[in-house]
Amino acid sequence: MSIIRLFLSAVDVTYSARSMSRPALHLVYALGAVALAAAAPPRRVALRVDVVQVSGEPRQSGQAAPVAALRELLRRSQKTTLSTRGYDLAVGETARFDLPNGAKAAITPMALEPDGDVRLRIEVVGEGAYQVELSVPSGTSFQVAAGRCPAGHLLLTIRPMTS
């Protein structure tokens, strides 16, 4: 018997049993609401992942900080989208894919935060391997490095959307 049918039969029993007190009726409704919430499908995360090749090297300007060097690289380089992937994932489910440089990437939605942020774990295994966990607002695109390739560097442009 499904949770919804069980709830509806409990309501029918409550109405037919006139001897039940008003607080008991409220308890039945509260338990039914909890059962319906538990039966609701889990929210999912739609991910759009672009694999982008960035060609060129930044000009050396003394002792540039890594962030400044990355900004310089992105500003002065040619960007080519090599592939676009779409995933529809439940929390805890992992999207795995190979990158053109031989590395492997995995993206896992870890949680849907109450403020609308999506907590993601991103792993790149290969040259320059790393794992990072971060929270980003749903619908916001961001980029992470995915290693070097013969023509330059690879970036992952990731956009999570909750449904």
Image (spheres, rainbow, N blue to C red):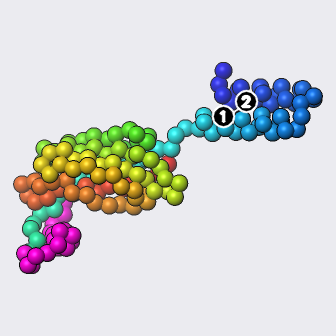
Q: Is residue 77 magenta?
A: yes
The amino acid sitting under disc 1 is: Ala
How many C-alpha atoms fall within 10 Å of the one at disc 1: few (<14), some, or many (≥20)?
some
162 in relation to 16, above or below? below
- Whether tag 2 and tag 1 are in contact, CB under 8 A, the answer is yes
> Residue extending furthest right?
19
Residue ID for mark 2: 7
Residue 156 numbered tag: none
Q: How many marks?
A: 2
Q: From the top left corner, tell me how far across and down residue 20 is, in percent.
A: 89, 30
- Rendered view: 104 above or below 4: below
Question: Which x, y percent locates residue 126?
Answer: 14, 45
SS under mark 2? helix
Report the magenta residues as a range: 60-80
Q: Residue at x 24, y 41 (%)?
A: 97
User: Which quadrant of the figure contains the N terminus?
Assistant: top right
Give the left or right position of residue 18, taking residue 14 as reference. Answer: right
- Amino acid type at mark 2: Phe
| 15 to the left or right of 114 | right
What's the residue at 72%, 35% (across, down)?
A: 31
**Residue 13 is a magenta residue:** no
